[in-house]
Image: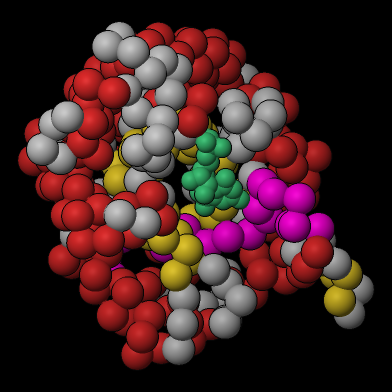
Amino acid sequence: MTTEQLTEQIKKKKSFLCIGLDVDLNKIPQHVLDEEDPIFSFNKAIIDATHHLCVAYKPNTAFYEAYGIKGWKSLEKTIKYLNEKYPEIYTIADAKRGDIGNTSSMYAKAFFEDLGFDSVTVAPYMGKDSVEPFLAFEHKHTIMLALTSNEGAFDFQTKTIEGKELYKQVLETSKTWKNSKNLMYVVGATKAEYFADIRNIVPDSFLLVPGVGAQGGNLQDVCKYGLNKHVGLLINSSRGIIYASNQTDFAQAAANKAKELQQEIEVILNSHSEE
Ligand SMILES: O=C(O)c1cc(=O)[nH]c(=O)n1[C@@H]1O[C@H](COP(=O)(O)O)[C@@H](O)[C@H]1O
């Protein structure tokens, strides 16, 4: 999916919500555990109940890899279901990959070609030749970690090196890479005070913003400086939506939580379009 198509969906659905499918078998309702493929059954119910309220889903691959081959199969079934039943939905494989060039090419092939995701998250630590193999894929996006939501973001990302914070250097340098038009960036919702500076460096890029809900980030604070003229934001919530209930009403409870966020987003979008 192109960024233009994603923006169209955001305007049509009045939502830039991304729902994180971080499925933990210890947290899902007991009756779903009796199904043949509990992870897929859980995802399918959540997707069917929430697809009209969001524009994207982001399975974090750790939650699938943790269950071995079975987990990987559940991930494959989930992305296939999304691509077949809801082709208008944008999909993100949250895998945080990145390695020497030929290895990165294989990671890109796995997520873009084999599984058929629209995008994948990557870490920038290994530099240009570790990210460019992902960027080579036409109509696919590489979502690079810029300033993450966790406390450890202050260990390296905000450190000043040769007069500039590292996360700023990552953003600036990545703009010089081949096919950089295929880049999006991860910025944590817990880092709202950094959005103005980030938007100065990447005014037109999409930002994937995790950390609202369970991690305490605030939607209004993020939107104040995070929005750009095309909207340019995807706000992710995982636990705050999918574990709203662990009873038989779990899918409806997730939809209610998603609806709360979507309505908040709709108000923001309406006032943004009037500016
Ligand atoms: O790349 C990410 O999505 C990510 C980056 C980041 O800085 N912080 C962060 O929480 N994430 C992911 O976003 C999701 C957040 O989940 P919740 O805190 O449950 O909403 C998890 O899958 C995290 O791995």
Q: Considering depth in this image, is 219 or 96 the residue closer to the camera?
A: 96
Left or right of residue 255: residue 272: right
Please check the rendered image and state whether residue 6 is part of the magenta-colored stretch, yes or no.
Answer: no
How was the colour assigned to the protein in this rendering? secondary structure
Residue depicted at 62% across the width and 20% down the height:
275
For residue 1, above or below residue 24:
below
Please check the rendered image and state whether residue 148 is part of the magenta-colored stretch, yes or no.
Answer: yes
Residue 17 position within the rendered picture, expressed as x and y whole percent measured from the top left: 44, 29
For residue 110, above or below residue 153:
below
Left or right of residue 45: residue 177: right
Residue 124 position by quadrant: bottom right
Q: Considering depth in this image, is 77 or 58 the residue closer to the camera?
A: 77
Q: Considering depth in this image, is 161 or 58 the residue closer to the camera?
A: 58
Residue 40 position within the rendered picture, expressed as x and y whole percent measured from the top left: 19, 38
Left or right of residue 149: residue 127: left
Q: Which residues are magenta?
A: 137-154
Q: Considering depth in this image, is 24 or 194 the residue closer to the camera?
A: 24
Residue depicted at 58% across the width and 60% down the height:
145
Residue depicted at 46% across the width and 82% down the height:
99
| Observer able to see residue 204 | no
